Each structure stands twice: as structure tokens, then as C-alpha cells.
Image: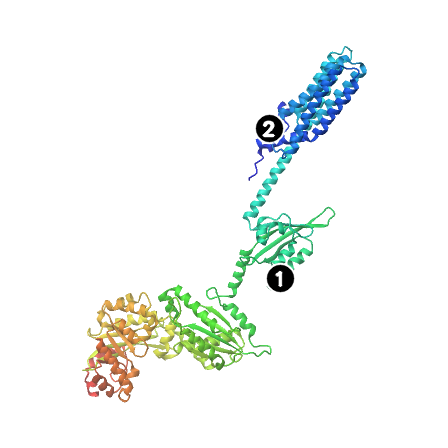
Amino acid sequence: MEPRPPADLTQPAPAGASRWWRVFETDDAADAASFRARQLQAVLKVTPVAMTINVANAIVITATLWESAPRAFLVGWGLAILLLAGAGLRGWLRAQRGPPRRAASERALRRAALHAGILGAAWAALPVVLFARLGHEDQFFVGMVACGMICAGAFALSTVPWAATSYVLALCAGSAVALAQWPGRAASGMAVMLLAYGATVVYSAWSYARTFGARLMAEARAEHQNEVIGLLLRDFEDHASDLLWELDARGRFVRVSDRLAAALGLPPARLQRLRASLVLRRLLPGDDESRSHWQALLAQVARASAFRDGLVTLRGPAGPSWWMLSARPLHDRQGALAGWRGVASDITDRHLAHRRLRWLAHNDSLTGLANRAQFRELLQAVLPRDGRDEPLAVLVFDLDSFKQVNDTHGHAMGDEVLRTFGARLAAVARRDDTVARLGGDEFAMMVRGVAEEAAIRALLERLFASLREPGGSGTPPLRSSVGVAFAPRDGTDVDQLLNHADIALYAAKHAGGGAWRIFDPVLAETGRQYTTREQALRGALAREEFFLVYQPQVSAADGRLLGFETLLRWRHPELGDIPPAEFIGIAENARLMPEIGGWVIGQACRQAAGWPSQLKISINVSATQLNDAGFVALVRTAADRLRPDQVELEITESALVADVDAAVAGLQALRAQGFHLALDDFGTGYSALSYLRRFPFDTLKIDRSFVHGLAANPGSQVIVDAVLAIGHALGMRTIAEGVETAAEVRLLRAKGCEALQGYLIAAPMAAEDVAGFIRSWDGRGLARAA
């Protein structure tokens, strides 16, 4: 229930005469009714004494005047006083039997004033009837009684000033009538004195009544303020995260709120019987951190001085909660400790957020593993030093083809792959091992107590076995390269050890991925060469260090020139000529091939534009080029001076392995525009047949590894026969690479191979030599050699 605003209690009292006839200044009906009830209660409180005095005085007066006054009047008058006193006592008894009166109407005040006036009139009848008939001694007695009753009655009725006024006026009027009947010279003077006396008594009654009313208004104002404060406190406790609490001198809870009881899990009545320390200790979790905070809080309380930010942890049905306590001691008049009063703030959300931030500072948010910073700290802490010689191994992992997973399946699938890989790393790790995600698709593991490959091999075999297991949620197969370095053999410094593990990792990736390598000093030199060439590659295109050579392709049947294959070469001013087998892989890993490959396509098409129109130009395309969204448009623009059927794009099987769907989509778009496609190095991978089923190439190229020594190698002949059979069955042209002997020409021609390429025909030649070769080549040399 909301408190009523005490607006009327704060208004200034009205000016003028009306101010004298108002006990309190309020326009609020409820407050006015409450004040009237308090006025009547004050009168009722003295009613038994007042009525007893009335009856006693009547008895004394009757006995005193029994011989000198008419006895019939005395008896009747005494009975009247007795009846009026009984009526007053009956009202008092009725009030005592019922509940305390909370409100009274103005009519109730009027009834009280009427009763007082009747009682005053009854007492006034005494001097009116008897004063003139009595002797001087009895007159003095009656006058003294009248004056005393005026004062006593007005005092008893002063909280209801209209009742006091009516009582005094009635009694004064009767006394005045009596004095008017008195023939003595002092009558007029006594009448004036009586009126002054009555006025003084009435004024005193009204003054006291106004003082009483002011006290009532002050109490009401204080009560309203307490209600507002209580409402604010209840609202504060209901809606804020803070709780108010108070302890007595024995450490027990005082005025337990429902929220405090709910927080502590006990009823308020029981909480008030228990010491707070016992309740909190019962709810204290058993971990070391909570006990430490509890001991610190007890130490603050023991100092008996105000404290802030005392932390306590409590167990609850929904889990632990954290509270921050601030309090000040309470002292009695003698300065002794009388209790505590304070605020408890629920900081559970803030504490959990702080713990989350601390966790994020040391852990990877995606996988939950340790992050790079924590891994380095832990590795630094356990590295052999200062006479400690416990060995350990650092393993660095890199997911193979992770970029293709992101590009093809989206980053959500990439995140799922990272989580899956991290979970499998953690599953094969021992309890003392540390697994971390260093960033991107790079992970690391610290394995304590191992110093050689034999000790680490079992763990790696378990890991690779787990990676071969299918993942959930459509996760693609996982492959990883691993580099291993041992401490103290390969270093006792964090950076040195991680660098050596990275060098071993690069060696594993360079070997084809899906394998592990142990660090060896020789690998460091290889790694330096790799880094040197990668740095040199980044500026090679701008420095015009690349150039193209062309190797002719001829018909196996008659030696007719069919076209040329484009081959990329790199000549560095300091490193010299670097074979494609060495720099193409580096360019792929460094994400340089889209730019380099785009230059190759454009340069080859420009140079082929000057050849006879019946000749084709074959251009190798890398996996990263196929995944480039602008690749199809680039090819079309570069070949704008050639017919699409003059351009044949050679796709290696490994390029398709990286991302089949993306590669097939790009190839279909190119083939739809008329470009020819060749599957290069057919048979060297492990999924070639599935690719042929999904996409019809125009040409199959037999890898040089099967052609070399073909005449003396029955196994190679079987493979060549199989490739030729597949090509013929699917309607594809076949071409053999690496033809170097006449015997190889005869066998390939006999088996039905349609085109040849190799050093027997011509070595790769510069662009300026192509025109001379075209003019001089007539195919007879090939016929004579075969």
C-alpha cells in the first residue's frame, strides 16, 4: 500500500482569526480523522480520573451543604452528576473493549463538546440555584468549587478545545447568573474577574490544543516520512542487487528482509535466531579461494572499524554467488559495540565476467585450449635450466588445406574444423601435456619427459589415426603437418624452440603434408633457403625476373605440329635459374600464384597471338588460381585476340584435390565459353578417376614418370595402356610428356597415343625462337627417329 503524500501538513497555517479556532492545519480527510481520534483518545485517557473527581466533589458538596441547602435539590443535582459521570465512564469502557480508534468524525467531537457542555451546565446549576440562599461561608465554598471545576474540567478537556470551551462557558455562565443575584458591592468586580478567569482558562485550553495538534502533525509528518523511507527501502531491496543487513551485539540478524532470507536460503524467523557467521560459514564453498576471502572478511570484522568491499562466496541451488560487503559498527551510549549495519552487493555477474576476462587472457575462446601467451608462459616455466634437466618436446601443428575449407564451406565450418582438431589433440594428450591454439590453424603441444622421436612416435600415430576418423556435422577430413623440436637438445629458449619446431613443420608441409618431421640442423638451412626464396619471389614479378619458354606438342601419327605448352622460368640475379619444382610450391604457400599465374596467362596469350591460327597454346593453371573468383574473367580477357579453342588450360590433379567443387564450377564456365581443358599428370594422384567421372576433359596428359623407360618397364606399359584406354573410351585426346627416345615414340604410336611432347622433339625454347621452329619443323625428323 502506498503512503499518502502529506502535502497539507507542509502548508503554512492560514492567517487571521480562523487560525485560533483550528487545532491542526490539514486538508487531508484521513489525517484529520486520525487527528480527531487522537484528540478523543487523550480525553478518554483521563476520563476515569475526571469522572471519579466529579462524583467525589458532588458527594463532598452534598454533605457540606446538607444542612443549609434544600435537600431535594442536592439529591437531584447529585444524581445528575452521577448519571453524567456514568455516561462518561461508559464511553471509556466501550473504547477500552474495542480496537484502538484510528479515525473520528467531526460529529464525534461535537458529541464530546455537547456532553462537556451538559456537564458544565450541571455544575453551573449549583451556584445558580443555591448561591443567593447560602450564607457567606457557604457562598465562598460554592465559589471555590466552581472556580476549581472550571480549571480542572478545562485541563481534562484541553485536547478537544470546543468541549473545554463549552464546559467552561456553561460553568462561567452559571456562576455569572449567581453573582448577578448577589446584592453585595463586590458582585460586579467578581463577575469581571470570573470572565477574565474563564477567558484565561479557555485561551489556555486552546493553546494547549494547538500544541497538541502541532505534535500530531509532526508525528504524522514523521510517519509519512517513515512510510516513504520504508517504501524506498523496500523498492531498493526489491529491484536493486544490493541488500541491507544489520546485526545486533551478539552477531544475529536484525529485521531480515525477504530477499536477504532468499539469498541465504532460510526463513526470516530462523535467521533472526542465528548468528550471521554460522549461517555464512555453512554456505561457504570448500575451495581455497573462498576460504581465503572468508578469513580476510573475519579479520576486517575483528578490527571493529568500518570496512568496504569484503568479498564472500556463498553456495546456492543455482550455483555459487559472490557478494561484496560494506559495513560500519554500531555503538551504544557507553561506546561498546552494539552491532553492525551495512550493504551486501551481489557482484556475481561482475565476478563471472572478470573471471571470463581472465580466462580469455589465457585461453582461446574458440577451442577452449591455452592461447599463445599462456603456452609461452608454461613452456618458459618448465624449460630445462638452472641444473634441471627434465626433457620435453614441443610439437607445432598446421592444418593442411585449411584455407580451402574456409573458402569453400565458409568460416562457420572452418571454426568447426578448428574445434574438432583441438578436441582430438586434447584427447590424445596426456594429463601433464599442454595443448594450445597459437592462432589461425596453428596449434601446439608441450609433452614433458620425452627427448627423442621414439618416445613421441606413439602419440603422433594416435593423433593421425584419430584424424582419419570422420568428423561430425559434415566436417571435411582432417590432415595436419607436424614439426617437432626437443629441449634441451634443440634449444632451451622459448623462441628458439618454437622456431625450430616451425622449421620442422615447414619441412613436413614441403614433403606433401599429412606427416611429421623432427628438427634437424640441416632443416634449418633448408628453411633459410625457403625463406630467402619466398622473399625473393615477392618482388620477382615487378623486377621482371620471370620469363616463358615453350615446348612443342606434335601428332604421334605424322609429326604434325599441334601447338606449344607454356613453361614458366625464374632467373634471379643472385640465386640464378631456379627450377619450377622449387619455386612453384613456395609461391603457392605464399599466396602469390594468382598474381603470377595471371601474368603467365596474359603473356602467353599475347605471344601466341602471332602464331598460325591452327596452333594451340597450353597453359598450366594452379589450384589457387582456380579458387579465385575472378579467374574466369581473367582468362577471357587475356585471350581476347585468340579463339577460345586455341587456348588449352592444363589442370593438375593435385589442384582438383584441394577443392573439387570450386574447381569444377570454374572449369565448367570456361568450357562453356569454348576453352579446352587438359588433365595434367594423370595417374599421379589418388582421385583421378572420380574427377573424370564428374567432368569431361578434352585431353589427358600421361605423366613423364610413366613414359621414361617405357620400352624396358612392363609396369609402366600397363599404366599407359590403361590411361590410353580411358581416354579413348571417354573421347579424350591423349598426349604423352617426357618423350626422349625413338623406342618410346614407337610404343606410344602403336598403343594409340595421339600426341607427343618431349626433348626428342625439342627442348623448351624462348618466345623469339618459336617462329623459327614453326618454319623449320616438318615432322620428318620424328618419322625418321621412330
The secondary structure type at the circle numbered 2 is: loop
Is 25 left or right of 190, judged from the image as shown?
Answer: left
**Looking at the picture, how far across and down is residue 478, in whole percent?**
40, 72
Q: Amino acid at mark 2?
A: Ser
The residue where tag 1 is placed is 291
Dividing the picture into quarters, in which one does residue 8 lie?
top right
Q: Position of residue 746 (x, y in %)?
A: 22, 86
Q: Amino acid at mark 1?
A: Arg
2 vs 1, front mark: 2
Q: Is residue 178 left or right of residue 34?
A: right
Most distant residue in the top direction: 183
Q: Nearer the viewer, residue 510 or 411?
A: 411
Q: Is residue 531 visible?
A: no
Residue 683 shows up from this direction? yes
Give the x, y percent position of residue 284. Answer: 60, 59
Task: Return the disc, 2 or 1, that comes first in the chain's sequence.
Answer: 2
Dot 1 falls on a residue whose secondary structure is helix
Give the residue number, with chain letter if any, for mark 2: 105
Q: Residues within 10 Å of mark 1 (few under 14, many from 20)?
A: some
Residue positioned 69% across, 31% down in the render: 45
Is disc 2 in contact with disc 1, using a CB cutoff of under 8 Å?
A: no
Q: Is residue 708 above or below residue 45?
A: below
C-alpha span from label 2 to label 1: 63 Å
Q: Quadrant of residue 215?
A: top right
Image quadrant in which the N terminus is located: top right
Q: Nearer the viewer, residue 514 or 749?
A: 514
Quarter where residue 703 is shown = bottom left
Image quarter (top left, top right, bottom left or bottom right) of the C terminus: bottom left
Residue at 22% in and 84% down: 751
Residue 449 coordinates in the image, percent (x, y): 54, 78
Depth order, front residue of 629/375: 375
